[in-house]
Image: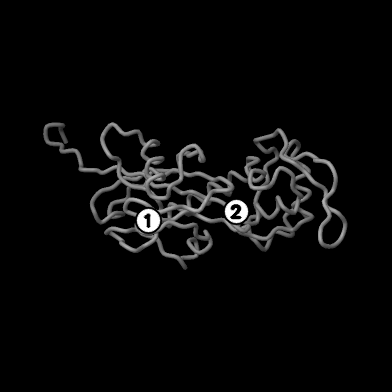
Amino acid sequence: MTEDHWTPPAVMLAVDLVILTLREWRLHVLLIERGIEPYQGAWALPGGFLQHAEEDLTAAAHRELAEEASLHAETLHLEHLGVYGAPGRDPRGRVVSIAYLAIAPGLPEPIAGTDAAGARWHRVDRVLSGDLRLAFDHRRIVEDGVERARTKLEHSALATAFCGPTFTIADLQRVYEAVWGIPLDPRNFYRKVQKTKGFIVPAGPERKVTAGRPARLFRAGPRKVLYPPMVRPVDPADAKESEE
């Protein structure tokens, strides 16, 4: 086909955001209730179309997050997650969406705005199971974002950001269990943590727990990239045998 006979397709660009946090030791994702068609009344990821041809993609992502949920750029570090452009993913036409991911502790309750009828944190397990259905192809985008988060916990010290300034090994284990979505054997988890030099370091006196011996306190260490990594058990049934 020559350029004289080629007509560029009409494509609309959009951004979508997967914002993850822990609330009550469960992984949650930020969703907005759509206030307009298509999918009016359905839950979806925050996002929307670029306002004009000169708008930067990351700037558009921050704008949409502020407009739809009142979360602001200075509280989050957005990273590129993927590009989603399958035909038919949006009934309004050919829409290519650039998705961004942020994983952060202590995020506030969202406040809906613009074309969002509501905004709230939802448990990720309800989305992944299909119990909570999302508009467009947003379940797939959430799946990809959660998998990225799970991988980041394998290879980085991100989990310590969800603990307090000092924490126990049990506290850290609860973060991994919440994000990975599987129970872990405490003895095996302790061995893995201790193998990874610089991941965590002792932090003073022990903390009294409700039963048993006082628990040792730790704080985040200097290492940001974990080696060896904290590899997930391949199957939940293997969680107790993975290091036997």
Does 223 appear above or below 28?
Answer: above
Instruction: Please name whichever residue, 93 or 58, is drawn nearer the observer in this view of the structure.
Output: 58
Residue 155, percent from left and from top:
63, 41
Q: Is the C terminus in the top left, top right, bottom left or bottom right quadrant? A: bottom right
Does 181 appear above or below 86?
Answer: below
Residue 110 placement, left or right of 95 = right
Which element type, helix, strand or loop, lies under badge 2? helix
Residue 72, percent from left and from top:
46, 41
Q: Is the N terminus in the top left, top right, bottom left or bottom right quadrant? A: top left
Residue 69 placement, left or right of 238 = left
Q: Quadrant for residue 43, please give it.
A: bottom left
Residue 114, percent from left and from top:
33, 50
Quote the CA–CA distance across marks 2 and 1. Answer: 22 Å
Which element type, helix, strand or loop, lies under badge 1? loop
Residue 198, percent from left and from top:
74, 36
Residue drawn at (34%, 63%) of the image: 41
Residue under numbered circle 1: 137
Q: Tag 1: Cα neighbours inside 10 Å, few (<14), some, or many (≥20)?
A: some
Residue 239 placement, left or right of 5 = right
Residue under numbered circle 2: 179
Residue 116 placement, left or right of 75 = left
Instruction: Please name whichever residue, 13 or 5, is drawn nearer the observer in this view of the structure.
Output: 13
Residue type, label 2: Val
Residue drawn at (43%, 47%) of the image: 70
